[in-house]
Image: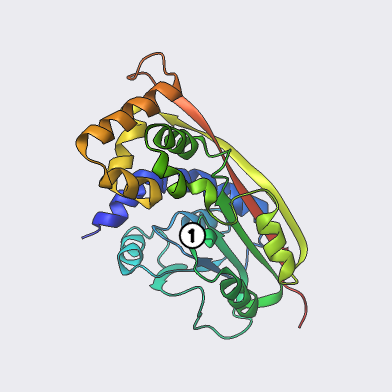
Amino acid sequence: MFGDAEAYERFMGRWSRQLAPLLVDFAGIPDTGRVLDVGSGTGALTDSVARKRTQCELLGIDPSQEYVAFANSRNAYPVRVRFEVGDAQALRFAAGTFQSCLSLLVFNFIPDRNKALTELIRVAKPGGCIAAAVWDYGVGMRMLRSFWDAAVAVDATASKLDERHMPLCRDTELEALWKRHKLTQVTQRPLDFSMRFASFADYWEPFLLGQGPAGSYVRKLDAGNREKLRAEVQRRLELPRPDQPFSLPSRAWAVRGIVAAR
């Protein structure tokens, strides 16, 4: 029933569940009021807010019915939290509905990011916080950087698919977007942490699930080229043994701003 959502959880869920508390702390949202999670996916950010802000009511929206169903099926706070299908570019809510609006690892995938941010500002209360985080695909997210560097080394055509070209993933880009929309007290900073893997297989096997640009690229390779890529990734990671645990650093860029009085 939850095939793609479960695959996403295995590929990126453990990352988003470690990153989400860092975004909540950085955003500094109050412990009361309604919070909107835009692009809530499998529910990592909403769950983190619910745990850290025990008086908040939360709504997560996502365009995927499957992700919404998955998140609702694992909702540990049904009194305060719910998930529904929704589009960040066309929110159904009245102006000033939410005290805070958050988004984790989503804003760079929204087709019209300006429209989405305009909508978040509209549905937030004056004085409310709007915060988001996006991977530093070009440098800091070593799990994906190692993958794409290896992919380009064995297949030059992979360069055009490399996630380093994603929008909003470089220093100051999120900050500039927030400032263009006249949010006040805009602050950007990196969110850093390390992810531990039990083995190289623990790192590599989620790429075979077809999730995200990297997974989609792997899925299109034939067996021979997939093996070449696997070997090159392993070589670049410089692991003493493939069955030993190892850690990789990761970085996301986060931004927060306050909605001005109307």
Residue placed farthest to the bottom in the image? 94
Q: Nearer the viewer, residue 5 or 30?
A: 5
Residue sitting at 66 percent across and 62 percent down?
30
- Residue at the farthest top position: 240
If the image is split into quadrants, where does the C terminus sit?
Answer: bottom right
Which residue type does callout 1 highlight? Thr
Q: Is residue 129 in sight in this rendering?
A: yes
* Residue 45 percent across, percent down from the top left: 50, 56
Name the quarter where the N terminus is drawn.
bottom left
Residue 33 versus residue 19 in the image, above or below: below
Which residue corresponds to the image point at 63% horizontal and 49% vertical from the top-left?
170
Q: Position of residue 92 (x, y in %)?
A: 49, 83
**What residue is at 27 percent from the left and 34 percent from the top?**
225
Horizontal and vertical percent position of residue 69: 31, 66
Circle 1 — which element?
Answer: helix
Q: How is the image coloured?
A: rainbow
Height in image: 115 above or below 230?
A: below
Q: Is residue 55 visible?
A: no
Q: How many numbered circles are shown? A: 1
Q: Position of residue 52 (x, y in %)?
A: 57, 53
**Vertical comparison of 251 with 106: above or below:** above
Task: Identify the residue at horizontal 58%, vertical 38% (top origin).
Answer: 139
Q: Residue furthest front?
A: 156
Residue 147 figure quarter: top left
Per the image, the residue denoted by label 1 is 46
When asked about the image quadrant of residue 56, the answer is bottom right
97 vs 227, nearest the viewer: 227
Q: Is residue 151 left or right of residue 218?
A: right
